[in-house]
Amino acid sequence: MREPVVIHPQLPTGLPDLEPELLPELNAHIETLRLLISEQDAGFLPFDQYMQQCLYAPNWGYYTAGSTKFGSELPTGDFTTAPELSPLFGQSLAQQVKQVLDQCVEAGHAPVILEFGAGTGALAASLIDSLANQYDNLEYCILELSPSLRARQQQRLGADNQANNNQYRGVKLRWLDQLPEHFAGCIVANEVLDAMPVYWLRRQGTEMHQYGVQFAPHTQGPVPFVLRTQPITGEVARVANERFPQIDGYSSELNLAAEAWVHALGQWLDFGAALIIDYGFPQHEYYHPQRGQGTLMCHFRHHAHDQPLIYPGLQDITAHIDFTALADAALEAQLEVYGYSSQANFLLNCGLPQLLQAQQQQLQDNSPNDEQYNRQWAQIVGASQTLLSESEMGELFKVIALGKGLTPPLIGFLRGDRRDRL
């Protein structure tokens, strides 16, 4: 048997210091993890369980506690998502959502949107602003695990005011606590699957090993933990052996939770489509021999780094999406794969240039002087370039549409559909 690999945590160069008022919170998280690890066999907490705790543990997980996660303002925000970057993202996406909803209505279903992990509510606001006047009985549902984010969404959409009867611009709002048993409509999941806990694995000769976390009180570093490998067998090892290249020491992730999510989608989706937007690759690129350290990434105060042990509960932990695995899971679940494309191609197909042109005209009509116009127009164009640029969100982010009962093609994939690359 090969000797285990041990990785000691290190503070990345250039990472902002943790605010002093958060130190007691960090120490409490460390103690909670120490107790949890002490209960495990050989004091070894598999990485997927560690990630689950850091992101979703009641009261202290990154997404379940009250810290600010989204936004461009330092020092509180850790990252900015496309809907917060520009309303043009949601306005463009709305064109695809409308096509799905129109087919639902034609088939005798009510127009319903279900968003997973709605963040600050920015995307919900953009979609409702774009679609509220298109339907008499539009309903917008949100499934949100984070109590703090749910509160932010309700505040942004005015749903914390009982006088409006949980409506925003005349659209009925509902927050769900669990998956529906049956659903017809359009599902939106923007940057959701990348935050599902992953197995972090390493090929060790002829064996497959998994990373896990162990308590190491004498470790030199920011936290008293280390990453250590140990052998893993069963279904996880079988799938990893199929997907990983035959390279000793090759490390990467398996997001079986995302594949399970798609399998479940096939059970409760009766008609409509799920639009999944996230960063990732098709499988042959995800497990490319040159990507031997995987895709695991952490975000803290707009700094990306690869140290998941530091700041547990106070930083985001993500992994890229294997879109081939999602498509395969969809076919196994009797779902159709309606399209797969880069975010740039999808937004262009959904009319972002025309929306940008209309916004420019509106700005010209309403700006009191050239200086204000030039400043605001530069901000709008800059945000649009970030959404579309190959070196930024345009190529790294992909869009895949999975569903049942619809008549293709979907407009977001009319040009640049890459299903043949999955």
Image (cartoon, rainbow, N blue to C red):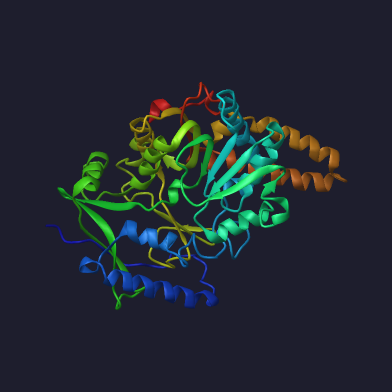
What x and y, as percent, mark residue 260? 36, 43
- Above or below, comparing residue 84 to residue 354 in the picture: below
Residue at 58% from the left image edge and 37% from the top image edge: 112
Residue at 64% from the left image edge and 33% from the top image edge: 352
| In the image, farthest residue toward the left | 1
What x and y, as percent, mark residue 141? 57, 44
What x and y, as percent, mark residue 53? 39, 62
What x and y, as percent, mark residue 328? 34, 33
* Residue 86 visible within the image: no
* Residue 313 visible within the image: yes
Report whether 365 appears left or right of 218: right
Q: How many marks?
A: 0
Report whether 216 appears left or right of 2: right
Residue at 53% from the left image edge and 40% from the top image edge: 188
- Above or below, comparing residue 356 to residue 309 in the picture: above
Residue at 38% from the left image edge and 37% from the top image edge: 326
